[in-house]
Amino acid sequence: QYGLGIERQIKPWFTGKVASVIPLSVEDEKKAPVRSVQASFANFVWGIPAESAPLYPDLGISTRTREQDKQLEIIDVEKDSPAARAGLQVQEVLLTFDGTPIVDRETLSRSMAGKRWGDAAVLTVRRADATVPITVLLRRERAATPEAAAKP
């Protein structure tokens, strides 16, 4: 963006012409169409629709490494995510993923990389003073809400 990416990095070694092509969502955060971008943003922009569902599953949690024991603690659970539907909660500590100890974010990411939509994962978490196994179903659908069920 703005000539600061590959264009800038390649300049010392390449004397030919370089152009940037950047994919850009055709809608903003409010679902309104993006009508223009700053001319210096890129040489070319490629309009793409918003992603309705990612190609690979995501638990839908954010974590942080706790200082005292270096374990991963859940700090956010996205609404309507596989983690939310399974009942994962903020402040729980992730212990295992399909039996593999979770020692850092990389281990969690590698474990998720082996999963596809339709799979399930068994996480063991520490909830308060209890160790709890939780099965997370990696499904694309959103949880049914009472409001949606009441509609004809």
Image (spheres, helix red, strand yellow):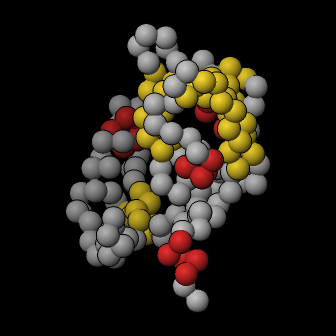
Query: Looking at the image, is 88 positioned above or below residue 25?
Result: above
Q: Residue furthest front?
A: 129
Query: Looking at the image, is 8 positioned above or below residue 48?
Result: above
Q: Nearer the viewer, residue 9 or 107?
A: 107
* Left or right: 40, with 147 as reference point: left
| Residue at image location 54% in from the left, 69% down from the top | 145
| Residue at image location 55% in from the left, 28% down from the top | 127
| Residue at image location 22% in from the left, 62% down from the top | 38
* Left or right: 91, with 86 as reference point: left
Q: Is residue 14 visible?
A: no
Query: Looking at the image, is 77 positioned above or below residue 44?
Result: above
The percent position of residue 35, horizontal first and vertical second, equals: 29, 76
Displayed quadrant of residue 143: bottom right
Query: Looking at the image, is 93 positioned above or below residue 53?
Result: above
Instruction: Report the number of numbered marks.
Output: 0
The percent position of residue 59, horizontal first and vertical second, equals: 59, 44
Q: Nearer the viewer, residue 8 or 125?
A: 125
| Residue at image location 41% in from the left, 65% down from the top | 25
Q: Nearer the viewer, residue 150 or 13?
A: 150
Displayed quadrant of residue 40: bottom left
Q: Residue furthest bottom?
A: 152
